[in-house]
């Protein structure tokens, strides 16, 4: 038989390892340094490092009563003085903010109240476990957690919510764990995903910022109460932070000197001396060459991670843009080669991979399975004057991603109508590698929306991808509060159960929209659903109001503010609700989109058109999880489904989208933000599914909801073009209150084999772009590989899959999520 | 009569294409992977894996006026093909969609409206409409009109043919084509008859004529390589030699696969390659 199986690059690598070929480096030529560094840390269970939590706690004890921004700056300064500094053997990049291997750090200002109890469970929890040293656990329980009890944002928020809102948000247990209905994400991260203006650090250094602030200090009105009580502490805080990061970098220089003295290997000694020189120079002063620029950016983002927990991990911004002048100059002068550049990047990626975003709460863990992280590097796109931005460094970054088998950093490629065929082909080749990179973001959708929200062309063209699918304008965006993730499949359940849910029995959680047998037409039923949907939105927006109000008292970001043009000019901290000239880009999430559409379509078809069942029968079948209702379940499963370019289902989807848009169009102004509709679940469609009983689309109880704007698992039977067209057909392009829709497409490697396959993948990407869809990402993998990996995880430890805007090791995921990924429709070549 | 319209096809012509499968074929290739395309009349295919089984469901049995449905030892529905009148009631009634009607009447407009749904995917890689089958030339008049209208809509067109047809039809169709995929299965006439049921003379004559009348039309000559039929080096070399000087001709060999085997069972037929 000649049924050949085609494998992706990643699959070939793993299969060759299973056959006993351990030399993965051999596959990719002489890159021994970064591979060796990676080998030392890859697959290790992360350990908790308490230094950040401890020094922040100690500093905060000393600064009570002072302005928040000053307290934050002082805590950072204390950290810079006290924390251990690290330079790893053979590393070219200096700096870690935790112990060797993979580490997570503590942010007790967020969850110190539950930290003491939670810490004991971390080593054994199913998703994203962490180890902890016994002595450190004691320090957490005795020193850190007690200080924060009663002071965290989480506790304040719980107190602030009205009972109706709280009932949709939290369980009534001791930790106020998430109910996964109208879920807040503000208490497990202190800001939404963020990206800094790294360019200012490379061009002016913190010395430049400090000088600017010194000037501002002199200009303050000595008699103005605002200047003296609000602006002055801001300026002082920024100056302290500039000094802190400089001091911290210098301590790395000293360490490098010490290590050089003890080093016998001559070439390593030279490297260490170079590192010392670099760390003495940056980030205080402008970078003079590529190596300094990379180190300067790395120090900045690391210190930013110490400052606050941006959900989830600070992004890297447009690396191929701000690093390009340094690269170009060094190449021209013969100081560096493309291989050197790739090695430096690979070293930085390993350093990045050692920091693991630690979520203490179970909700945070469930949202971000598989040690999620989104330190997105953006490549491609357009320059501020609207030209194609791709350069040689873009290609080095793509090449590094193809050749270095690591899921760090997350990589996002911007695509626009004039993207060259070469760029698109290299992007396609990288996708074909099969580890899920890069995800694609569409300039043709993002830029007009940014303009509609008030940005200038130059800012809009220069956006950075941030996190999973957000797009930031680093000197214009000023919104930071995390947002609500709303389980609309629960709203559907409440329409069936008259405001109640299968999981919670008789408790009235939503609103009563009528007993199921009182609806005599589909329109009536649909109207009832829309009332439930609107009720959820109402509470999400109430929640958001309280979050925005309270956060300003709990968090400050002197470093983030120092790197923001508008904060420096208005002398207001980035965490404050209003900053002059800012554009606030927030969002709320529609979770379970296809689950709801398909359920509505099934009811419309089976109950009101084919008249094969009554609503009461459907309710009865749902309560029994379809046991004994196989015939009915089959009818429901075979009703029209979203994702097939079928207007029957898509028109319902468009209506849901529109109703949500109209709500935010009307009320987001009251919050002072653009609260845009998004369809980006992270991994939350799994825990959200766990609270939702059987649904009328035939989905069984407690199984995952549909994911992002993708079709329900396995429901898209007309191929990927139909999935894209359904997405297009359900969007309301007339409104600008929308943001990302996350779209997963799974292709078999045979679909994209060879040069022809690359070309056809490019054709597909270009059609996606022309449809003005926001985001798309691909898993190029054989179904058999996933099934084999589930059976024999030990052989597939390094199998990467795309989840929701990030790639993670398949074997790090819970069984539920693994099954969910397997259940996504695989598109075979036809 | 069309049995399927398939979007996102990557292997039958340039770019991303939509394939319209027409029903009816003059050949009976033993390895055929689309047996549902062979007969001209609509047929019912059935997937026992989807059937809920008699213990749970007998909706099809209840609705069948001809009494053509019985249940197997495994409690799965089985159509007695000799009794079945092809009324299609069971297709509509089955909750699990275990039955599928293979073959629908479409108007040319209906076909092209479906094909055009994916037009945004065609424009970058020169993708478009491919008519396949079955043998599209068997419904010659429909095919020619379909292609003519497709050109009016500025769609790129291709057909996939076994080449066994009357030349005037092929010639008419070729006027509206941007590419043709043409099977050359074997130069050995006896083998050809044994495995496909028909001589290859007409096919080769058609290809020669096509090359003479449409030298500029891109031609993809293709050989499905079938074990025991045409997989010897001599067989394949003979085909290559035959094609050597043909104008605008690209040659491709397609590996044998058995993806169609399940379909034979679904139609209540036997797969000849295993005989
Ligand atoms: S109606 Fe369908 S599911 Fe029911 S017995 Fe017949 S074939 Fe099986
Ligand atoms: S097509 Fe009609 S006659 Fe044939 S099995 Fe189905 S219901 Fe019976």
Image (spheres, rainbow, N blue to C red):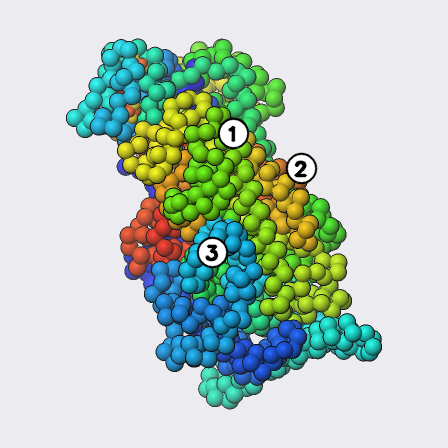
Say which chain tag 1 marks: A
Q: What residue would you read off at disc 3?
A: A170
- CA separation, marks 2 and 1? 26 Å
Q: Quadrant of residue A126?
A: bottom left
Q: Which mark is residue A734?
A: 2
Location of ligand 1 given as a quarter of the image: top left
Residue drawn at point x = 38 percent, y = 65 percent: A129
Is residue B139 shown to the viewer in this render?
Answer: yes
* Mark 1 CB within 8 Å of ligand 1: no
Mark closest to the chain's N terminus, 2 or 1? 1
Q: Quadrant of residue A19?
A: bottom left
Which mark is nearer the camera, 2 or 3? Answer: 3
Residue drawn at point x = 25 percent, y = 28 percent: B56
* Mark 3 CB within 8 Å of ligand 1: no
Mark closest to the chain's N terminus, 3 or 1? 3
Q: Nearer the viewer, residue A330 or B116?
A: B116
Q: Which mark is residue A524?
A: 1
Q: Is residue A681 above or below residue B56?
A: below
Q: For numbered disc 2, what is the local secondary structure?
A: loop
Residue drawn at point x = 57 percent, y = 68 percent: A308
Quadrant location, the N terminus of chain A: top left
Q: Is residue A645 above or below residue A344?
A: above
Place of residue A364 in the rendered image (x, y in percent of width and height, measured from the top left)? 46, 60
Q: Badge 3: few (under 14), some or many (20 or more) residues near its Cα, within 10 Å?
A: some
């Amino acid at each position: 038989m000649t049924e050949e199986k085609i494998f992706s690059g990643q699959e070939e690598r793993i299969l060759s390892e299973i056959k006993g070929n351990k030399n993965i480096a051999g596959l990719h030529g002489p890159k021994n340094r970064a591979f060796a560094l990676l080998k030392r840390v890859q697959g290790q269970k992360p350990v908790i490092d308490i230094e950040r939590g401890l020094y922040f706690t100690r500093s905060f004890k000393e600064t009570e009563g002072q302005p928040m921004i000053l307290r934050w700056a002082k805590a950072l300064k204390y950290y810079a003085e006290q924390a251990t500094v690290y330079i790893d053997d053979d590393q070219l990049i200096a700096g870690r903010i935790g112990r060797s291997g993979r580490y997570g750090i503590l942010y007790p200002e967020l969850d110190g109240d539950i930290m003491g109890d939670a810490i004991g469970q971390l080593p054994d929890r199913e998703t994203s476990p962490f180890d902890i040293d016994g002595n450190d656990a004691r320090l957490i329980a005795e020193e850190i957690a007690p200080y924060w009890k009663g002071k965290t944002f989480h506790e304040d928020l719980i107190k602030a919510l009205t009972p109706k809102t709280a009932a949709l948000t939290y369980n009534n247990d001791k930790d106020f764990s998430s109910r996964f209905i109208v879920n807040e994400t503000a208490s497990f991260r202190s800001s939404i995903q963020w990206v800094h203006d790294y360019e200012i650090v490379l061009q002016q250094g913190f010395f430049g910022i400090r000088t600017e602030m010194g000037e501002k200090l002199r200009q303050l009105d000595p008699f103005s109460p605002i200047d003296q009580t609000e602006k002055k502490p801001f300026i002082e805080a920024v100056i302290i932070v500039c000094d802190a990061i400089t001091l911290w970098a210098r301590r790395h220089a000293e360490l490098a000197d010490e290590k050089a003295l003890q080093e016998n290997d001559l070439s390593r000694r030279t490297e260490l001396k170079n590192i010392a020189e670099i760390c003495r120079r940056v980030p205080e002063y402008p970078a003079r060459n590529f190596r300094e620029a990379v180190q300067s950016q790395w120090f900045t983002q690391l210190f930013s991670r110490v400052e606050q927990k941006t959900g989830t991990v600070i992004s890297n911004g447009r690396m191929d843009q701000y690093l390009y002048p340094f690269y170009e100059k060094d190449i021209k002068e013969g100081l560096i080669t493309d291989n050197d550049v790739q090695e430096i990047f690979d070293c930085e990626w390993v350093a990045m991979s050692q920091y693991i975003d630690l979520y203490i709460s179970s909700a945070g863990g469930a949202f971000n399975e598989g040690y999620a992280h989104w330190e997105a590097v953006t490549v491609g796109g357009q320059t501020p004057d609207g030209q194609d931005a791709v350069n040689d460094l873009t290609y080095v970054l793509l090449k590094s991603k193809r050749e270095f088998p690591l899921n760090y950093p997350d990589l996002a490629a911007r695509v626009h109508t004039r993207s060259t065929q070469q760029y698109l082909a290299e992007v396609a080749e990288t996708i074909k590698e099969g580890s899920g990179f890069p995800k694609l973001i569409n300039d043709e959708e993002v830029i007009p929306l940014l303009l509609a929200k008030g940005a200038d062309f130059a800012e809009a063209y220069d956006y950075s991808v941030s996190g999973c699918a957000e797009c930031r304008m680093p000197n214009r965006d000023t919104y930071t509060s995390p947002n609500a993730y709303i389980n609309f499949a629960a709203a559907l359940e409440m329409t069936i159960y008259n405001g109640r849910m299968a999981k919670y029995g008789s408790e009235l959680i939503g609103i009563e929209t009528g007993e199921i047998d009182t609806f005599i037409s589909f329109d009536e039923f649909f109207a009832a659903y829309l009332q439930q949907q609107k009720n959820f939105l109402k509470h999400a927006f109430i929640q958001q109001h309280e979050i925005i109000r309270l956060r300003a008292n709990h968090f400050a970001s002197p470093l983030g503010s120092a790197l923001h043009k508008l904060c420096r000019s208005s002398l207001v901290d980035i965490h404050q609700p209003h900053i002059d000239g800012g554009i606030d880009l927030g969002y709320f999430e529609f979770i379970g989109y296809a689950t709801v559409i398909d359920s509505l379509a099934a009811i419309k078809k089976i109950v009101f058109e084919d008249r094969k069942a009554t609503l009461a029968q459907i309710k009865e079948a749902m309560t029994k999880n379809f046991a004994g209702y196989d015939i009915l379940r089959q009818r429901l499963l075979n009703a029209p489904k979203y994702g097939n370019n079928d207007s029957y289902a898509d028109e319902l989807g468009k209506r849901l989208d529109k109703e949500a848009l109209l709500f935010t169009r009307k009320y987001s102004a009251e919050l002072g933000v653009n609260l845009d509709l998004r369809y980006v679940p992270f991994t939350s469609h799994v825990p959200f599914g766990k609270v939702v009983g059987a649904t009328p689309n035939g989905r069984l109880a407690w199984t995952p909801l549909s994911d992002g704007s993708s079709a329900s698992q396995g429901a898209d039977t007309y191929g990927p073009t139909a999935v894209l067209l359904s997405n297009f057909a359900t969007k309301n392009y007339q409104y600008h209150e929308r943001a990302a829709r996350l779209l997963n497409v799974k292709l078999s490697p045979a679909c994209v084999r060879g040069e022809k396959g690359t070309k056809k993948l490019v054709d597909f990407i270009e059609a996606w772009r022309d449809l003005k869809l926001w985001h798309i990402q691909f898993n190029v993998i054989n179904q058999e590989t996933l099934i084999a990996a589930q059976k024999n995880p030990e052989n597939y430890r390094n199998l990467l899959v795309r989840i929701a805007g990030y790639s993670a090791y398949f074997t790090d995921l819970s069984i539920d999520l693994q099954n969910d990924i397997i259940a996504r429709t695989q598109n075979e070549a036809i | 009569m069309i049995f399927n319209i398939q979007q996102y096809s990557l292997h039958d012509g340039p770019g991303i294409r939509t394939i319209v499968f027409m029903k009816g074929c003059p050949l009976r290739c033993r390895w055929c992977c689309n047996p549902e395309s062979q007969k001209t009349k609509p047929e019912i295919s059935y997937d026992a894996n989807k059937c809920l089984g008699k213990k749970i469901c007998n909706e099809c049995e209840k609705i069948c006026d001809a009494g053509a449905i019985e249940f197997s030892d495994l409690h799965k529905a089985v159509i007695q093909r000799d009794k079945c009148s092809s009324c299609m009631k069971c297709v509509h009634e089955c909750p699990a969609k275990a039955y599928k009607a293979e073959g629908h009447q479409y108007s040319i407009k209906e076909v092209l409206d479906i094909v055009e749904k994916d037009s945004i995917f065609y424009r970058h890689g020169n993708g478009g409409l491919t008519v396949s089958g079955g043998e599209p030339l068997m419904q010659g008049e429909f095919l020619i009109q379909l292609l003519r209208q497709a050109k009016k809509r500025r769609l790129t067109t291709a057909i996939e043919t076994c080449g066994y047809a009357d030349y005037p039809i092929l010639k008419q169709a070729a006027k509206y084509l941007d590419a043709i995929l043409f099977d050359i299965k074997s130069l050995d006439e006896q083998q050809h008859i044994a495995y496909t049921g028909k001589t290859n003379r007409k096919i080769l004559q058609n290809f020669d004529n096509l090359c003479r009348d449409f030298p500029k039309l891109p031609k993809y000559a293709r050989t499905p390589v079938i074990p025991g039929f045409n997989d010897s080096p001599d067989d394949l070399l003979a085909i290559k030699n035959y094609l050597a000087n043909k104008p605008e001709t690209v040659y491709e060999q397609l590996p044998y696969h058995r993806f169609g085997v399940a379909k034979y069972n679904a139609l209540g037929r036997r797969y000849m390659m295993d005989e």
